[in-house]
Amino acid sequence: MTFCFNQPIQTPFTTFEPKIAVQPIRSLINYCERNGLARGDLLQAVSLSEEQLNDSRLLIDVQRCEELYAFASKALHDEMLGFKFGQLFESDRWGVLGYIALTSLNLADAMKAQYKFQSLSGNMGVPTLTLDDTNSTLQWVPAYNCSHHISEQIITGFISLARTLTNKGQLAPEGVFFTHKAHSKGAYYEAYFNCPVKFDSTFNGIVIPNTELQAPIRKSDSELNKVLCDRANAMLAQQTFNAPMEVIKGHILKTLSDHVPEIEEAAQHLGLSVRSMQRKLQEHGTSFSQVLDAIRKEMALTYLRQTQNSVLYVSDRLGFSEQSAFQRAFKRWTGMTPRRYRSAITKGHTDTN
């Protein structure tokens, strides 16, 4: 028996298509080329020209990155491609964000800057940081049903970044967590992270001692860091002008982990009047509430596909006041309840969306 979703209620904007900056795509292509794959084949897999690959302003559909990983991992016979690529530190992989990290005071400040300027690197996921008395939990919540390559690249990349910035080659978290199932070569992960690694977890992320977040960055430069942050602010303003929808979606995605944003708040964050924001949304045939609804839908599907978190947890994370309100919204989106959807996914009935 195969579960098929009913058609969702039609609105002018019913989908959320996450984007990624072109720089990490370029780095991944260069990495795969060094490992023996033909550059032309890699460009074809990601449907990009060399000219597009060198346009630092370009944001592309994250599905192209997934297609590149699918092609390259198959060609290289390597299911750990994202894990290996994440270990390679390149400051220019994230453009100005990489250089801001290099010149920050400590890891905590570097992470704050990455969060603030996140939309410059796309809206494929959102980082969250939770602190207790001794440790901090850094989670990366994907904005779509990502492959294990992406989540491994993100988490491994953070550790690589932290070790490089602080010159602590053996910096070790307390634990590393992935929502996907373990590979046959799981021992390689514990050897690299130098700590226990749990697969099939409820989240993608790391637990790291608070003291490590205060570790000074060896190339810290407050004056240069200010110049770079000013540059990033200018780039954000330009992005708001050139690609307002991506900035609006990025802000909603980032804010949703803490609270449900209102249009007034989003407009203020983007330096727009509410009327200007409404006009930009109308030009794209949508509204703020429709964009918010589409992002909530995609995040709900991702949580239910990739984690074992409870329906109540998912409801809370997406800002619903009551679980019943989330269940009604989910049934409107998909034609079934969250539990029935998860059951269908678990049984392999993936005729979704």
Image (cartoon, rainbow, N blue to C red):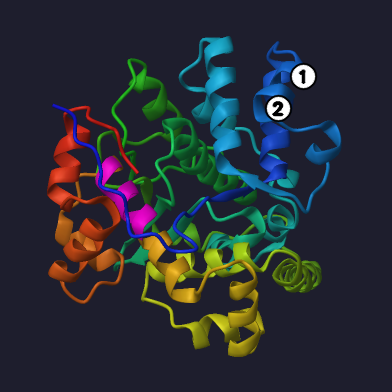
**56 vs 218, nearest the viewer:** 56
Marks 2 and 1 sit apart, C-alpha to C-alpha, by 7 Å
The location of residue 310, given as percent across then percent down, is 15, 54
Q: SS class of the residue under badge 2?
A: helix
The residue labelled by disc 2 is 29
Residue 347 percent location from the top left of the image: 16, 29
Tell whether 204 sits left or right of 113. left
Nearer the observer, 96 or 309 = 309
Residue pointed to by mark 1: 39
**Secondary element at image label 1:** helix
Where in the figure is residue 70, as x and y percent of width and height? 53, 23
Task: Quadrant for residue 241, please give it.
Answer: bottom right
Q: Residue at x 71, y 69 (%)?
A: 236
Q: Residues within 10 Å of mark 1 (few under 14, many from 20)?
A: some
Q: Quadrant of the N terminus?
A: top left
Name the side, left or right, on which 61 lies relative to 254: right
Q: Which residues are magenta?
A: 297-305
Residue shown at the point (59%, 50%) measured from the top left: 19
Label 2 close to label 1 by CB (< 8 Å):
yes
Visible residue check, residue 68:
yes
Callout 2 environment at 10 Å: few (<14), some (14 to 19), or many (20+)?
many
Residue type for callout 2: Ile
Q: Nearer the viewer, residue 223 or 129?
A: 129
Magenta stretch, main secondary structure class: helix
- In the figure, residue 47 lies in which quadrant? top right
The answer to whether 83 appears left or right of 21 in the picture is left
Up the image or down, 144 lies above or below 104; here it is: above
Give the quadrant of residue 271: bottom right
* Residue 117 seen in render: no
| Residue at image location 53% in from the left, 13% down from the top | 74
Does the magenta-highlighted stretch encompass residue 64?
Answer: no
Of 225 and 10, nearer the camera is 10
